[in-house]
Image (cartoon, rainbow, N blue to C red):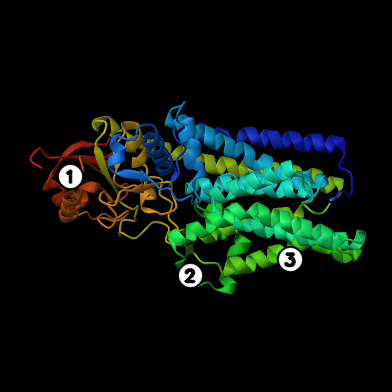
Amino acid sequence: MLKSGHFGLSNQKVVNRLFYSLLFLHLIPLFFGKYFLTQDGPSHLYNAFVFKDLICHPHSVFANYFEINKVPNPNWLVTVFYSLFMMVFPAFVAEKIFLVIYVLFLPLSFRFLIRQINPNSSFIALLIFPLIYNITLYLGFFNFCFSIILFFYATGYWLKYQGLISIKRFFVFLFLVTLTYFSHPVSFVILCMMIGVFIVSEWVHDIRIRNNASLFVSQRISIFILSLLPSIIFFVMFFRGSGTETVFTRRYVKVYIIDQLQNYGLYFMGKTDLRICTVFAAILVFFFIYNLAIRIKNKRFYRLDILYLFFALFSILTFFSPEEIAGGSVILIRLILYSNIIAIICISAYSYPENLKKYSAYLFFAFAIFWLGFRSYHFLDEQSEFHEFMSLENNIPKGKTLLPFIIQKSNPDGSPVDTTRDIDINIFQHAANYISLEKKLICLANYEAEQSYFPIKWKAEKSPSGYFQENGEMISDSAVLKYSNKVGNWPDYILIWDESRGINKRKSLLFELSKHYMLEKKSIHNKAWLYRKTAQI
C-alpha cells in the first residue's frame, strides 16, 4: 500500500461531502417511474419471477413452457437476487432495491479499492460517478454491472491484506471471487489479470526488502490459485455446455485510438453525450500526462507504475478481443468501460499536491452533476412513451400467452436511426416482459430462455426460437401457424409496437394478422396495437 504524503483534514472533509452528495443525487433517476427503463432489464425481472414461480409452484402455468437450467453458469446473480426479494416484495420494488444497491455500492466499493492503493488519492474516487449510468446499465446488463462492484471489493480485499491472508480471510476472498464469476465472466477474467499484476508488484517490492521474497510470492500465488479453483471448474463446465464459438470483427488501429480518445464506446445519447464522453477521456489523459511529467522531472518510478503497463497491455488486448464468445456478445463495450476504470485506478497510485486535489475534486463533482443531469433528462423523456406501451396491459387477462412484436425504430425512408452506432439501444425491445410479469403471462419473446448461460430455459417442445424475429417489420401467419402446430395452441395475444412509421402503414403485416386475429385495442397515439386470437382458432 502506497502511503506517501498527507491529505489535510479539511480537504478530506470536503471530498467526503462531495462524495456523499453525489451518492445521494445519483439515486434520484431510479425513482422517475415505476420501472427503471433499460433494454434487457425487463427480461431479467420477468425470468427471475419465472424462476421463483418454478421453485415455489412446480406445477404452475410457467412449468409448461420453462425449466430451470441446472448448469452453474455465469449470469445467475441477478436472477437469484430478484427471486429472493420477490418472495417478500412486488417485482418493481425488487428491481428498485437491486438498482439502489448498485448505485450506492459502485462508488463505495471503488473508494474502498482506491484507499487500499493510495489513501491520499481518495478524491480520485469521485471519477467513478460518471460511470454509474453507463451504456452497459442502459443496455440492461445488470449482472455485468454488479460484477464490477465485486471486482472492486475482491481486488481491494487482496490489497488490504497484501495477499497474505488467514484462513478466515481466505474464505472471504474465495467468496468474492466465486461471486464475481457468477455475476459475469468478463469481470472474473479481468479480476484474475489485476490480481496477477499486484502479485508481480508485491514480488518486486519484496525482493528489495526481504531475503525470502520467493517464499512470500509462492504463498500469494498458492492462495490465489486455490481461490480460483471453484470458479475454474464452473468455467470449464460453462464452456463445455456453451461451446467456444468466437466471432471477431475487423478493427483499424487509427480508428480504434481515435475512438478511445473520444470514449466513443461509452456514448449512447447522441452527439452531446459523445462530447461529454470525450471530456471525460480528456480528464484521464491530463492526469496521465501529469504523472508522466512528474516521473520525468523526478527521474524515478513508483512501485505501482506497473499499473500503467497493465493499462497499455489491456488496451492492446481490447483491440484484438472478440465481439462474441460462447454465446455472449457485446464484449468490446464492456472492455472499453473497464479501460476507463483501469485508467482511473492508474492515476490513483500517485499522491498529488493539495491544491490540485482540492480543485480537481470540485471539477469532478461539477462534471458528474452535469452528466447526471443530461442523462436524467433523457430518462424522464422516455417515461411518457413507456406509459403508452404499458397502457394495454389491462386488456390482457392473467395466465395467457403473449407474442410481442417490436418494430425497430427507423427513419421515414426505413433506415435505422443513428446508423453510426454498432449497437442500437431499444428500451421497448423486451418491455413486454413487464406486462407479462404484471399479468403472469407466458411471454413468447423471452430471449434469455434461448441462451445457455441464464437460469431459465425453454422446454424444447415449447421454444419459439427460429419462428419469430426479435426485430423486423413482418410477421407471417404461416410462422404463427407452424409454432402453433408445434405447441398445440395459438398465442392468445399479439402486441405490436411501432414508434416510427406507424402501424397503419404496414399493410402486409395487418393483412397477415387479420387471418386469425382481431384488433382488441390501440394505444392513445396508435403506437401500440393489441390483437386477440379469434374464437374459431
Amino acid type, label 1? Trp
Q: Quadrant of residue 298?
A: bottom right
Q: Are marks 2 and 3 in contact (CB under 8 Å)?
A: no
What's the residue at 63%, 44% (across, down)? 175
Please tell me whether residue 145 is drawn above or below residue 196 in the rendered image.
above
Distance from label 2 to label 3 (Cα)? 25 Å
What's the residue at 30%, 34% (across, down)? 60
x and y percentages locating residue 407 in the rendered image: 30, 51
Amino acid type, label 2? Thr
What SS does tag 2 mark?
loop
What SS does tag 3 mark?
helix
What SS does tag 1 mark?
loop
Q: Nearer the viewer, residue 377 or 205?
A: 205
x and y percentages locating residue 61 in the rendered image: 28, 36
- Label number found at residue 309: 3
Per the image, the residue denoted by label 2 is 249
Per the image, the residue denoted by label 1 is 490
Label whose residue precedes the other's in the sequence (3 or 1): 3
Distance from label 3 to label 1 (Cα)? 59 Å
x and y percentages locating residue 343 in the rendered image: 69, 57
